[in-house]
Amino acid sequence: MANLDLLRKRIAEIDRDLAERLPALTDPAGLESFRVEFLGRKGRIAGLFKLIGEIDPESRAEAGSLLNALKKKATEAVAAREKELSDVHLEERLASERVDVTLPGVYRKLGHLHPLTIVQREVESIFMRMGFDLATGPEIETEYHNFEALNIPADHPARDEWDTFYIDDTHLLRPHTSPVQIRVMKETSPPVRVICPGRCYRRDAQDATHSPVFHQVEMLWVEEGLSLTNLKYVLEAFTKEFFGEGYEMRFSGDFFPFTEPSVQVHVKAPGSSDWLEIMGAGMVDPAVLTEVGYDPEAVTGFAFGLGVERMAMLRYGIGDIRTFLTNDLRFITQF
C-alpha cells in the first residue's frame, strides 16, 4: 500500500519538472505536449490521483488536498506560460507588421474623366433634371430599327448617308442612336420622355471635323398636345444650362426622314456674330408614330440629336476632333 511520504516525493518531482521545464518552452506546440503530459486524462498528475485508494484511510484527505493543490498550481503555471508565449508572438507579429508613418507614401495618380465623358454626363444630367429617363440600346442594330422603322426605306436617297459598317446582310453598326427611340416606343405607351446616349459609326473619312466613330445623345418626347413651340422651349432651356447666360438660339429649316417639320438648331455666343450649328431636331414624323403603334391623331412628339464631340469642341474651343482620340494625358487632364 502506498504511503503519504511516497506521494509527497512524487509531487516534489512534478513540482521540480514544472519549475525547470516550463520556462524553457518557446512554442505553442511544445506547451500543448507539456500540458497533456502533466494535466491530461492519462497524465502524470491524473496518475497520482489513482494512488489515493492505496493510501491509509486516515491520510487520504491530506493526500487529496496535496494533489488538488498540485493540479491547481500546474494548471495556473501552464496558463501563465501560454499567455507569455502569446504576448511574445503578438509583439513579434506587430514588429514585423510595423509601418513607419514617417516615410513618404507611394504616389499613385488618380484617374481623370475624358472630356467627352464629362460633356456627355452633363448633357444627360440636364435632361434628367427636366424629367427625362435615360435609355440605351445595342450598337449592332438591325436594318429595320436603323432605317425602315424610321421612315427610311431601302430605296430612299437619304439612306446613303447612314449606310455604314455591315456585320451581315441585315445587321450593321448603328449610325445614330435613333433605333433606341424605336425600341423604347415599341415597349412603352405614351407619354415617353427619354434621352438616348451612345457610340455611333459612319463611313466618314477622318479629318478635323469628322470621325468614323463618334458619340451622340438623342432626345425623344411623345405626348398629347406637343408642338414645335415645346421643342423650342426645351432646347432654349438646355442651351442656357449648357452654354450659360447670354447665348442665343435659332431654328432653320432642314430635312430628316423621321421628323416633319425638321430644323437645324444654331447658337450664338454673347458678342459674336457667328451662328454655330449644334444639332438637328424636329417633330416626329406621323409615319414613325404609326410604325411603333401610336396614333398620330392622338399624340405628337419631337426629337433631336446632338454630337457629343461637337458640343465638347464648342465648349472647350477644340479645333480638331482627332484630339479626343490621341489619349494624350497632357490634353485630357486639362478638363
Image: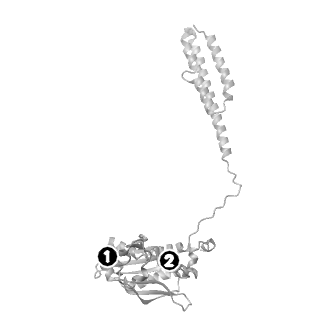
Q: Which residue is mark 2?
A: 212
How crowded pointer 1 is (Cα within 10 Å; few <14, some 14-19, many 20+) is rated as some
Name which residue type carries label 1. Val
Taking depth in this image into account, of 159 and 220 the one nearest to the observer is 159
Give the image location of residue 101, x and y in percent. Answer: 69, 54
Q: What residue occupies the far bottom of the structure in this picture?
A: 273
Rendered image quadrant of residue 286: bottom left
Question: In the rendered image, which quarter contains the N terminus?
Answer: top right
Q: Is residue 334 above or below residue 59?
A: below
Q: For the point 42% across and 69% down, which residue is it?
A: 138
Q: Which residue is mark 1?
A: 292
Colour style of the rendered protein structure:
one colour
Q: For the point 66% across and 47% down, which residue is it?
A: 97
Question: In the rendered image, which quarter contains the C terminus?
Answer: bottom right
- The mark nearer the N terminus, 1 or 2, is 2
Disc number for residue 324: none
